[in-house]
Amino acid sequence: MLKDKVYKLCKTIPRGKVSTYKEIAKKLNTKAYQAIGQILKNNPFAPKVPCHRIISSSGNISGFKGKKSGKAIKEKISLLEKEGIKVKNNKIDLSKYLYKFK
């Protein structure tokens, strides 16, 4: 089931690193980017399944808990910063923080 694979893959992303919806899709050999977003939006296992580490391919903080702005995004940024990830203008430097799945 795609949901289980997405959750399992998210758990492999180490603290201090992020990945993207696209990278998850590539690793799972699918183009179901939106489905992956929906799965993570409804993640009942956070923070054990660290969906806050998933961002858009552009490096933007794209959403959290189904929200695109406000308190949820501030919470996501706070979680990332606590892991040592620098966020500037709601964006993360992927050349520094992107985790590449093996």
Image (spheres, rainbow, N blue to C red):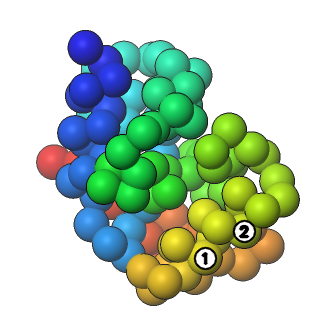
Image coordinates of residue 11 in percent, x first then y, are: 25, 51
The residue nearer to you, when weighing 100 against 12, is 12
Disc 1 marks a residue whose amino acid type is: Ser
Mark 2 residue crowding within 10 angstroms, few (<14) / some (14–19) / many (20+): some
Outermost residue to the right: 70
Can residue 73 be seen from the camera position used here? yes
Image coordinates of residue 56 in percent, x first then y, are: 60, 46
Q: Which residue is denoted by mark 2 in the rendering?
A: 74
Q: Are marks 1 and 2 in contact (CB under 8 Å)?
A: yes
Q: Which residue is denoted by mark 1 in the rendering?
A: 78
Whole-angstrom CA distance, mark 1 to mark 2, is 6 Å
Q: Residue at x 25, y 14 (%)?
A: 1
The residue nearer to you, when weighing 33 against 83, is 83
Q: What label sits on residue 50 in the rendered view? A: none
Q: Residue at x 71, y 60 (%)?
A: 73
Q: Residue at x 43, y 70 (%)?
A: 97
Image coordinates of residue 99 in percent, x first then y, are: 33, 60
